[in-house]
Image: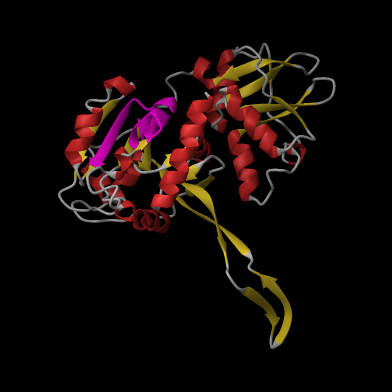
Amino acid sequence: MTEVIAATVRTHQTLQAAFTAAAGSGERVAVVVDGDGRVLAAVTDGDIRRAVLRGVALDAPVGGIVSAAPMLVAADEPDESVRQRLLANGLPALAAVDETGRLVGLRRLADLAPDAVPAPVGVLMVGGRGERLRPLTDKVPKPLLRMGGATIVERLIASFVRAGVDEVYLTLNYMAEQFEDRLGDGSSAGVRINYVRESQAMDTAGSLSLLPPQTRPLLVSNGDLVTTIDFAAMVDFHRFHKAAVTVAGVEYAATVPYGVLRTADHHLLHIDEKPTTRQLVSGGMYVLAPEVLRYVPRDRPFGMPDLIDAVLRDGLSVTVFPVFERWSDIGSKEEFERVLFEFAVEEEET
């Protein structure tokens, strides 16, 4: 049993507060307690993200999403019983309570079945030319541009390692040798790096056909993203839903620069002046079950939307993992300068 850490919230606190507490706990679990310290429920990172997908706002009280029949365990429940419950429900941990209902610790899958969940294999797509950032990318590939003390791709690799990844494939095309020169075998980053060279541009999924057969889940990302996403939480989410594919969804806001007419037949009801619409868009990060690779045709360009459509046509599950953390694809020189400034400020403060 792990030591109790400060990952408790009250029912009146917000989902955002619970999300922050869960992220800081190391187990991505926040325990909801009453005024006397008795456990009412436990909410996971995934519970909060699923609630937001249902339309619950992050500033809503967390008490509104807790289960009426929370899954808790007694402090003295046998390890094998707890292990089976964790595996059956795809959970990283369960809150353990004493006979008075107070929190005494967490029963963790990592302690009870450390080898039950295979570590994901990482795949970083770094073959693009970074056309939108020219001339910055005329001599340096976009993923090798520096953000503070490290390059974009090095930051992604470090995030993968924190999610338990021990092996990463880099799919290369544009200026491939620069990645090998910079990253080597990956030992300095605590990971084994394998390089896969495209003979032609393979679109966003085609290079997956160049990987050797896999038996573990694949954590796939565009290699030019700057993000603080918790990749381990994304893998947990994928496992919880027993999905074939999990897609990271990022909120995108666009303001219409005109007054929008709201009508009923020929009648004007209202004018919305320059409204902002919000959509969930693909964040370029995915978790794939290994069997999904059979849908990728060999040696020709193939897009990730095509792969997902093929999976859906066969009736397999594709889930969406909403991203609350920082995310940017550095789509312009102005965006690059803004994110670069943010990292410079943060690193100076630390």
Q: Position of residue 128 (x, y in %)?
A: 27, 49
Q: Is residue 294 left or right of residue 8?
A: left
Q: Residue furthest right?
A: 36
Magenta residues, as a range?
147-171
* Residue shown at 84% from the left, 20% from the top: 36
* Residue 191 falls in image quadrant: top left
- Foreground pick, 167 / 158: 158
* Residue shown at 34% from the left, 46% from the top: 292
- Say how the picture is coloured: secondary structure
Q: Is residue 261 left or right of residue 36?
A: left
Q: Is residue 169 magenta?
A: yes
Position of 230 relative to 311 (above/below): above
* Residue 121 falls in image quadrant: top left
Which image quarter holds the N terminus?
top right
Q: Position of residue 44 (x, y in %)?
A: 62, 32
The answer to whether residue 85 is seen in the rendering is no
* Residue shown at 61% from the left, 62% from the top: 276
Q: Residue furthest bottom?
A: 266
Q: Position of residue 301 (x, y in %)?
A: 24, 56
* Residue shown at 57% from the left, 42% from the top: 324
The answer to whether residue 310 is seen in the rendering is yes
- Foreground pick, 146 / 341: 341
Q: Is residue 155 magenta?
A: yes
- Foreground pick, 208 / 72: 208
Q: Position of residue 158 (x, y in %)?
A: 39, 28
- Foreground pick, 292 / 21: 21
